Amino acid sequence: MQTPPDPDSLLLSLDGFEGPLDLLLELARSQKLDLARISILSLVEQYLTVIEGARRVRLELAADWLVMAAWLTWLKSRLLLPHGSQAAEEGADAADVLAARLRALQAIRAAALWLGARPQLGHDVFVRGAPEDLTQTDRSRLALDMPALLRAYLVALKRGTKGKRYRPAPTAFWTVKDALARLQGMMGSVPDWSSLEAFMPVSETPLQRRGAMSSTLLAGLELARSGLVRLRQEEAFGPIMLRQGDGDVTEQ
Amino acid sequence: MSQSSETVDTPAEAAEVLDMPALLRIAEAMAFASTVPVTPRALGQVLPVGADADAVLAALVAQYAGRGVELVEIGGGWQFRTAPDLAKLLTKVVQVPRRLPRAAMETLAIVAYHQPVTRPEIEEIRGAALAQTTLDSLLEAGLITPRGRKETPGRPTLWGTTPQFLAQFGLTDLKDMPRREELLVETPSPLSQPEETPAETPDEAPEPQG
Amino acid sequence: MSQSSETVDTPAEAAEVLDMPALLRIAEAMAFASTVPVTPRALGQVLPVGADADAVLAALVAQYAGRGVELVEIGGGWQFRTAPDLAKLLTKVVQVPRRLPRAAMETLAIVAYHQPVTRPEIEEIRGAALAQTTLDSLLEAGLITPRGRKETPGRPTLWGTTPQFLAQFGLTDLKDMPRREELLVETPSPLSQPEETPAETPDEAPEPQG
């Protein structure tokens, strides 16, 4: 049996261990190389000594360390029992499980070392630093399929029938109301027969002009009905003349 | 021997300087791994003291002459490049078909179902203005073609689909397209040609089959 | 070989098939240009009909043996890499990322041997909690990847290694990793061999996706 490592030296580097299993493995490795033949009991005692020492110095030990300590205390009590009892069997089984876990961790640690020792890409070996791209992208072809065409058609129809369809900007027409106001306003300043066109506003388009013509005619007829104006037309399609009326409704 | 002690420290290093294959290995690895062309100056910093970087690079160029990759000078440095005759052989053309923009797809669908159809009619059906670029892209792709003019004021161009359209969609005939009635659960407000089944319209148009 | 006139159309093509230096040029250029290891199958598609891609690759490996750049087998294909002994010189000019810390290397080893494996299982084997930063660093390096979920309560994510893992450590296959018995210098335990033998796990683990 080799002498166990100085617990104080381990205590100083407790933070360096990745959990209780890591510490146990380190203790086992310092005890004997052959993990299969280590004395679990002696390992348990070493761990408990380390933790006990650590608690004296630092009270705020991580829960992991203490849970493992509690379990190992239980294991130690079983391992100390004489052989043959059921409790001693339990202890032996638990010791086997612990040994197996340590071996598994040992294997993983060895695997990590094996991996780390390999020439690593980007660390020890390098691939081409400036690779050439020998692929060309041809986007000349069209990806067309019938479902997409039909979907597009339905979307178009839906939009078209939603009243959002294209309409020309509405034209401002000269209303009868507008024409009435204008006629009444101009009446006093027109002494004799004048063409209906003289009472029309300036129109921008022929359509607007025709609209204004009919509105003014309607307004003139309305005023003629109450005798305020008199209307006259010499021939079919000829110019319509208008003058101020005298209240006589009967005159044509 | 002691005279040359200023430039060459030990006999072992002197041997290293003179060993051209070893220098070529270093230059080769560096030119390969470097992300930028390797200048003689950069190589000189890696080679043992006393080695002639220019000479090493020249030897490396000679070693790779006529091979599948060659060391070529790029902007004052040296870099491995695929031999031009092999670049053609190794270049893979990856077909990435384009999708038509949504507006073009809708326009194409309307032309297919309503042909022969004018641009204002397309706008009326879509409920949106039709950009000239959209029409142009369909023309360029050879999917639509003019089919005469409509005898209405302004005599607008009538549009129809092409044999290329049928080929692109894997159709033998426009009649293979689903009928409008099959597509629509509720018939939308009838447009300029209400009772017509659009798929049958091309009968009077030029033959679609190529 | 020229007798097989069915496969070889002209004498010129037959000559091309037989001309090993020309075939080596093609393989060389392809392996240089490819960002991923070149498989014999991929090379075969570029070589003239009748050429033996495996033989060409073997000849190319021999041609580059001992040089500054070597052709090595990685994950079922072949890739040019700088010779490992030149690392010290090259790291002067090539940026090298930080090495993975011990916790990350051990976690990676556990994933490699026990995949697919859950995070709680990794923590169980290491006997320590797995820091988020450790998992993140392995994911960022592209060395591990999720492989679905384990059908147990909580459905924890299963982890496995990637093709990048093989590339990073220069492995052809997960089977290249040593068996557990080879890793442990001790003689195998005569009494209690645990149920699961971790070193055997990779054989039944799913093949890494290509």
Image (spheres, coloured by chain):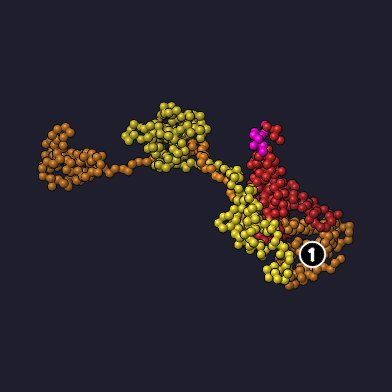
Chain colours: A orange, B yellow, C red
The picture quadrant where one finds residue C52 is top right
The residue furthest bottom is A57
Q: Which residues are magenta?
A: C6-15
Front residue of B39 and A131: B39
* Vertical placement of residue C51 versus A101, above or below: above
Is residue A185 a member of the stretch shown in magenta? no
The residue furthest top is B203
Image location of residue B145, percent across then percent down: 42, 34
Where the N terminus of chain C falls, by quadrant?
Answer: top right
**Residue drawn at (67%, 45%) of the image:** C21
Front residue of B191 and B79: B79
Q: Residues within 10 Å of mark 1 (few under 14, many from 20)?
A: many
Image location of residue B88, percent across then percent down: 58, 44
Identify the amino acid type marked 1: Leu
Front residue of B139 and A28: B139
**Residue drawn at (75%, 52%) of the image:** C177
Image location of residue C195, percent across then percent down: 80, 51
* Vertical placement of residue A6 versus B170, above or below: below
Is residue C8 a member of the stretch shown in magenta? yes
**Residue drawn at (46%, 36%) of the image:** B142
Q: Identify the residue position indicated by label 1 in the image.
A: A27
